[in-house]
Image (cartoon, rainbow, N blue to C red):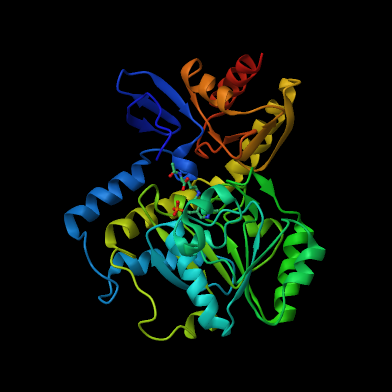
Amino acid sequence: MYNKHQVVMVRAKGATVWDETGREYIDCVAGYGVANIGHGHPDVVKAIKDQADRLIVMPQTLPNDKRAEFLTELVGVLPQGLDRVFLCNSGTEAMEAAKKFAITGTGRKRFVSMKRGFSGRSLGALAFTWEPKYREPFGDAVDNRNVDFITYGDIEQLRAAVTDETAAVILEPVQGEGGVRPASIEFMQEARRITKEKGALLILDEIQTGFCRTGKMFACEHSGVVPDAMTLAKAMAGGLPVGALAMTTEVADRMPAGGHGTTFGGNPMTMAAGVAALRAMKRENMAEQAREKGAYFMEKLRAIGSPKIREVRGLGLMIGVELKEKSAPYIAALEHEEGVLTLQATPLVVRFLPPVTISKEQIDQVVAAFARVLE
Ligand SMILES: CC(=O)N[C@@H](CCCNCc1c(COP(=O)(O)O)cnc(C)c1O)C(=O)O
């Protein structure tokens, strides 16, 4: 299934990863945007060790102190009004929950999703995903008959697509897998206005953009848009598997008792790591770090001036360099020749998702390496 690289990674700290031969890499993959606070953050490591000694397993039918602490921390950083949370274990699970809560929350069944969007790999989440390569192997087991796809950023199409049958619009503030494409502030604000007008929910997918990645705690803050629900995962628990659907009380209260569930969601280990991670993000002002370092990183990438680069784009430390040719060979050269790990985001884009704690010196090394492989 996976395009497995010919290395074995055995250790990591901050933005550095080591393979089994002891070779060092600067990590601009960070687990696909998971290690935002850096690999092996000491606060998270300590929290995991302490919690392991206290309590690892406790289902959500039995309240737990760490879970309560995490929910308080999370609601404390979420946009005002998103004060109810369904906890789970991945982004896909958060998207599955979003679909169910939107249906019970509105009594409607239609959705509007974005071309080039990515919502996860389950059959339910795939229904929101436009890219055929993800869906086609499964045929009509991916049931997207209730989904209208529009061009990302097209306000006219959005206005036409959202009706009084629409349960929700699903939208990434920055499309990640779709090529690192930030939505315009106008598009975000129109999506909020149009959904409110039609009684549909606005569900923002901040699974990749959340938790300081784009220069704010959440990407929606750049436009001031407050959604009815938000899917979260990746960096939320300092590297442990996690997912959540944050939502308004109005949406939460319309889910019938026992209407959804999860065995591992909200487990004390993940919650303990999450408390430490969220506190570290605030204490180390990581949103501002991402803003400042992202601007620096993109300025240096643009200064390379290679004729092979079509565009450098992104928001904070969610960066994509679109080339005029396939990006895969350059990603491979960066890894094998330069010891820099990067990832694709559609065939022409080299994506950089480093830990927010990456140093300026490491950014300079990554840019110099990229300039060399582009020669
Ligand atoms: C190697 C590998 O498996 N990569 C993953 C990378 C997925 C990265 N994105 C996850 C994601 C998801 C799904 O999140 P999860 O289930 O992978 O945690 C939902 N929404 C958005 C905006 C996302 O970016 C994949 O190809 O499915």
Q: Quadrant of the N terminus?
A: top left
Question: For this view, does 223 lie left or right of residue 333?
Answer: right
Q: Which residue, as the protein is rendered here, is positioned at the far left? A: 53
Q: Is residue 249 visible?
A: no
Residue 213 in the image: above or below residue 86: above
Q: Is residue 179 visible?
A: yes
Residue at 53% across / 57% down in the picture? 119
Closer to the camera in the image, 178 or 68: 178
The image quarter in which residue 219 lies: bottom right
Residue 241 in the image: above or below residue 258: above
Residue at 63% across / 28% down in the picture? 326
Residue 127 in the image: above or below residue 178: below
Query: Could you tell me how many numbered marks the image carries?
Result: 0
Residue at 54% across / 38% down in the picture? 353
Residue 186, image x, y percentages: 79, 60
Question: For this view, does 168 lie left or right of residue 302?
Answer: left
Closer to the camera in the image, 17 or 358: 17
Residue 266, image x, y percentages: 33, 65
Residue at 71% across / 70% down in the picture? 192
Q: Quadrant of the C terminus?
A: top right
Residue 366, image x, y percentages: 57, 23
Residue 161 in the image: above or below residue 273: below
Q: Which residue, as the protein is rendered here, is positioned at the far front? A: 139
Question: For this view, does 293 lie left or right of residue 272?
Answer: right
